[in-house]
């Protein structure tokens, strides 16, 4: 019995030692595993934290932007005004409705001068910012500026008119010394008047070509309709541009839109036109007779023109450009048929049939005659093509006069 007990104890000891040894290994392994698991978890938490931090930064930026936008949207709009003059550190400004105010200029706004565009607070009208946008570059977008290719030979008839334009515009630009020696002052500009399509623009372009001058074209009605509130400033910028590109010719088409005698109704539109006109007069008066900038005004309505524009020292040479007579028409036909392939066309007969046609209509007849030939698969133009073309242009004119543009 005793030996049996002893044996059992010995067995127990061996058994417990074995178990203890296995536990440590397993525990060690388990610890290692859970450490690895913890490290992995730690890594995951770390990268989640990074992501959350990134998201927080993004949301913070979004919030800041939205907040900034909200603050901006809550700000009252600023008025655009023009500085009329500076008196010390204060300014007299003119609002678009032409009212003038004497205001303070914020210390942050530097270098404000008369003629600048500024932003003013709606309530106090104090100047809070200067607008830097209006420059010569802007005015270049509003006018057509080029070196025209049309020359004296592009003009049919108009012999007297060409002579006069040469005398008043070409000669002083080409030979100013002659005028100094003789001691007379050439006109600063001319006014071409007459029906539409008679070659007024053509004359202006030809003289710009012959004097190698920059041709700056503005349309009076556009100046006052398109650029409301900006007309006067634009006129000023156009003259500055002309001086910088001299020798130059400023061609103002439809000058009657600016310079017409009108009932002063006192509307803001009237005041706007008036201001633009006054600026034009001031600019014309502001340069010298022998400056190499010349102005050519053109109008179909000389009858409604304000006489201020044609006073001595301004556009004081008036040149009528009327409808061509038969000889003139023949000359114009010759210009426009120069490159046409004509067969047995009696141009004199054609000219006789185009009574009361303007130069533009004569050109239209030549083009139409060419189309009649093309429609019949011919490469040459005949007398009959011209006769049909004259009829077509005449009918078109009558329809236009009746106000029937379509059918
Ligand atoms: P508007 O008063 O409508 O502005 P305008 O008198 O300025 O007209 P232009 O633009 O010079 O007329 O003429 C239009 C076109 O008609 C010219 O481009 C030219 O092709 C033709 N034309 C007019 N007159 C003549 C002319 N005397 N000789 C040759 N072509 C002419």
Image (cartoon, rainbow, N blue to C red):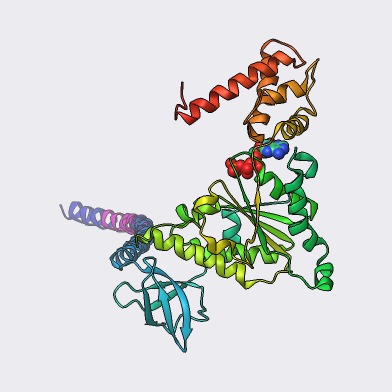
Percent from the top left, x then y, of residue 233? 52, 65
Q: Is residue 99 visible?
A: yes
Task: Specify start and end residues of the magenta stretch as a single range.
Answer: 15-31
Q: Residue at x 55, y 54 (%)?
A: 255
Q: Which residue occupies the extreme bottom position in the image?
A: 88
Ligand 1 is found in which quarter of the picture? top right
Q: Is residue 207 left or right of residue 318?
A: right
Query: Which of the pair 122/332 is nearer the observer?
Result: 332
Magenta span contains residue 82: no
Residue 129 figure quarter: bottom left
Q: Nearer the viewer, residue 124 or 209?
A: 209
Pinpoint residue 285: horizontal percent, then vertical percent. 61, 71
Residue at point 52%, 69% (across, down)? 132
Above or below — where is 75 with respect to 388? below
Question: Can the viewer see residue 39?
Answer: no
Magenta stretch encompasses residue 18: yes
Horizontal and vertical percent position of residue 2:
17, 55
Q: What secondary structure prevails in the magenta region?
A: helix
List the single residue furthest toward the top: 376
Front-lying residue, 55 or 42: 55
* Nearer-the-camera pick, 87 or 44: 87
Number of numbered discs visible in the structure rendering? 0
Viewed as shown, does residue 258 lie left or right of 144?
left
Residue 393 spot, x, y in % from top left: 59, 24
In the rendered image of this protein, does residue 84 appear above or below residue 255? below
- Residue placed at 74% from the left, 62% from the top? 247
Examine the rendered structure and indicate whether residue 208 appears above or below residue 405: below
Vertically, is 95 above or below 174?
A: below
């Amino acid at each position: 019995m005793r030996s049996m007990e002893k044996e059992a104890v010995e067995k127990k000891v061996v058994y417990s030692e074995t178990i203890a040894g296995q536990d440590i290994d397993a525990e060690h392994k388990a610890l290692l595993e859970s450490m690895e698991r913890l490290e992995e978890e730690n890594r995951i938490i770390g990268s989640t934290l990074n992501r959350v931090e990134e998201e927080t930064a993004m949301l913070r930026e979004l919030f800041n932007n939205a907040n900034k936008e909200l603050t901006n949207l809550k700000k009252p709009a600023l008025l655009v005004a023009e500085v009329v003059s500076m008196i010390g550190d204060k300014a007299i400004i003119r609002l678009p409705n032409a009212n003038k105010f004497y205001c303070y200029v914020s210390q942050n706004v530097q270098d404000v001068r008369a003629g600048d565009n500024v932003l003013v607070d709606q309530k106090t009208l104090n100047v809070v910012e200067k607008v830097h946008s209006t420059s010569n570059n802007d005015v270049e977008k509003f006018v057509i500026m080029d070196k025209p290719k049309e020359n004296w030979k592009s003009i049919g008839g108009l012999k007297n008119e060409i002579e006069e334009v040469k005398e008043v515009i070409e000669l002083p630009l080409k030979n100013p010394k002659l005028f100094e020696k003789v001691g007379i002052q050439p006109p600063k500009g001319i006014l071409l008047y007459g029906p539409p399509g008679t070659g007024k623009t053509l004359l202006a372009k030809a003289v710009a070509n012959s004097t190698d001058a920059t041709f700056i074209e503005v349309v009076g009605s556009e100046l006052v309709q398109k650029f409301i509130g900006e007309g006067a400033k634009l006129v000023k910028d156009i003259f500055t541009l002309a001086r910088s590109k001299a020798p130059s010719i400023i061609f103002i088409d439809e000058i009657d839109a600016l310079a017409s005698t009108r009932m002063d109704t006192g509307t803001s539109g009237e005041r706007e036109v008036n201001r633009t006109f006054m600026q034009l007069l001031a600019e014309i008066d502001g340069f010298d007779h022998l400056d190499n900038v010349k102005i050519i005004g053109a109008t179909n309505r000389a009858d409604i023109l304000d006489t201020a524009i044609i006073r001595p020292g301004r556009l004081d040479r008036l040149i009528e450009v009327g409808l061509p007579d038969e000889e003139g028409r023949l000359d114009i036909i010759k210009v426009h048929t120069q490159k046409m392939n004509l067969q047995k066309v009696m141009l004199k007969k054609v000219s006789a049939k185009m009574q009361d046609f303007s130069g533009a209509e004569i050109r239209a007849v030549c083009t139409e005659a060419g189309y009649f030939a093309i429609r019949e698969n011919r490469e040459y133009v005949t007398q009959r093509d011209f006769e049909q073309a004259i009829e077509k242009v005449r009918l078109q004119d009558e329809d236009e006069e009746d106000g029937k543009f379509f059918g």
